[in-house]
Amino acid sequence: MTSSSLLKTLAACALAAGAGGAMAHVTLPPGAATVGSDYTAAFRVGHACKDATATRGIAVRLPAGFVLADAQARPGWKLDVQRAAGEVRWSAESPGTAVPTAEHAEFVLRGKVPAKPGVLWFKVLQTCDVGQADWAQVPASGSSTAGLENPAARLEVVAAGVATVDVRDGWVRQSVPGQSGSGAFMKLTAPTGARLVGVSTPAAGVAEVHEMKMDGDTMRMRAMPVLELPAGKTVELTPGGYHVMLMDLKQPLVKGTTVPMTLRFEDAKGASSSLEVQLPVGTGADAGASAHDHMHMK
């Protein structure tokens, strides 16, 4: 896949991230995987099949290029690993160990992703006490799952140096002529943990992560040289909390436009990576709902 194709793929994935059907999908955790890396695939089942009361079986069909290492057993479930067929199956040993529709469950396997960037599609057959749901639809072109009733679980494989952090619901507060500062807000999820160590944008002379916090009866703001992103936990940058402070604006930020921004991260070993995003300018919910962040390679 070319760099241009990957850019389009990542952008489409971000736009489709919030799309959902009437039924809960079988999904992977937010975030990407680096080329050639080990990956823990935790398939989240959030609902039984239509008109069913419990999930009794999960069968994951492994995509080409994904090399299975092992799968995690579940108490009360039979685990069947079919390496030759490229399939991993879990089946409840009794109705009492099935997953009720009101509960969430994870089915975990581990493996290595390919050495080339792209998108992997894991097709998952969910068997219930009534019927089945085959989460196997893949878009005919591109990677957007918008409009698909039963999309396969998607994993983005990104080039070395591109952060695997998931960035969503980002927006920048609009400004007026003469205003020198503004704020940017988003949700960050690092699948294996990371630290946000820097932000830059051509729209402002200075971009820093700040925290607003009550100190007694006074609200104070301080710069955060490092923002910790615990593994798998979503950290929200919001008005009145953590946020990106934009100072020395180069021009007014007009509603309906976008602001390019580079986010720089470090992992637990100190390895650096970055993401380029385009954040819509608005007044809050309208901006966040207008578009998801477009992630780009750097």
Image (tube, helix red, strand yellow):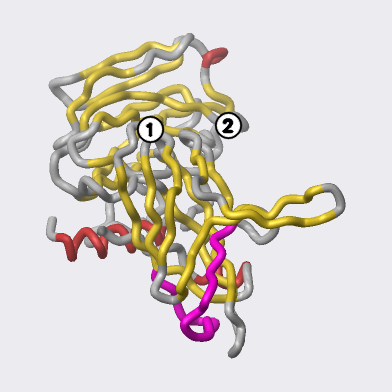
Q: Position of residue 19 (x, y in %)?
A: 47, 57
Residue 245 colored in magenta in the image: yes
- Which quadrant of the view contains residue 160? top left
Residue 174 in the image: above or below residue 92: below
Q: Nearer the viewer, mark 1 or mark 2?
A: 1
* Part of the protein shown in magenta: 243-260
Name the residue carrying label 2.
101
Q: Residue at x 49, y 49 (%)?
A: 188
Gap between marks 1 and 2, in whole Å? 37 Å
Q: Position of residue 267 (x, y in %)?
A: 36, 37
Name the residue carrying label 1.
268
Q: Nearer the viewer, residue 103 or 55?
A: 103
Please tell me whether mark 1 sits on a helix, a strand or a loop: loop
Tell me: 149 left or right of 221. left
Tell me: 90 left or right of 102. left
Instruction: Say which amino acid is labelled 1.
Output: Ala
Q: Are marks 1 and 2 in contact (CB under 8 Å)?
A: no
